[in-house]
Structure formats: C-alpha cells, structure tokens
Image (tube, rainbow, N blue to C red):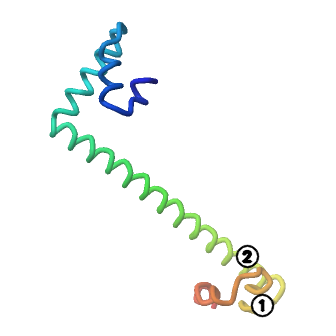
Amino acid sequence: MQLIDAESEEEFNMLANTNIEPIKKAVVAIKEMDADEEIREKAFQRETALRDRASALRFARDEGIKEGIKETTVKLVKNLMSTMGLSAESALSALSIPEEEWKGYLPQLR
C-alpha cells in the first residue's frame, strides 16, 4: 500500500531501499516506465480511452433508459385510449406526463 500511496520522490526512493524484493522490482519498473516517454504516452492514451469508453457506456445506458420509458409510456397511453376511451391528451394527463412533453408522444399516438 505504501508503494501505491507514495506522494513524493523521497517516499518512493525509501521504498526502493526496502528488503522486500517484489517492492524493489516494482519501484524499478515504475521508474523505467516513468522515464520512457513512449510508455507514458501509451499509458495516457489507454487511460483516456478507458474514460471515453466509460462515458460512452453511461451515455448509451441513459439514452436506453429514456427510450424504454418513452416506449412504455406510449404503450400505457394506447392502453388507456383503447380500454377507457380516453383521448391521447387525457391519457397523458392521467399518467401525469407534463404538457411540455406531450409533443414528443402525440405523433406516435395519432
């Protein structure tokens, strides 16, 4: 944990002088990677790609949820229209859909 939490070059060098061989090897590997600009750039690109992918997945999930809500609402409104004889507007109102959102549903309900 000290290796991961090291905040200064001094702490890092102290860990390099430990008697624990795996930590020594890890410090050497980290120093070599830090010294190699190409490796640093690749690590940065990978980190950026991972963040971009996570962001894209969150966006896709959120859009999927919105689409699912819209499809379900359309089905509910159509059900209210057919079983209770309500107009599209009355059914939307009965489901407490705000009037400013009705324009997104009405074309599918006509």
What residue is drawn where x is 43% and y is 52%? 54
Question: Along the horizontal axis of the image, is 58 left or right of 102?
Answer: left
Q: Nearer the viewer, residue 63 or 22?
A: 22
Does 10 appear above or below 94? above
The secondary element bearing badge 1 is classed as: helix
Q: Give, as a three-letter code, the residue at label 2.
A: Leu
Residue pictured at 82% horizontal, 82% vertical: 83
Displayed quadrant of residue 105: bottom right
Q: Nearer the viewer, residue 82 or 7?
A: 7
Image x and y of residue 15, in percent = 35, 18
- Rendering coords of residue 61 (x, y %): 52, 59
Q: Amino acid at mark 1?
A: Ser
Disc on res. 60: none
- Determine whether, in the image, residue 66 is placed left or right of residue 24: right
Residue position marked by numbered label 1 in the rendering: 90
Residue under label 2, please give it.
76
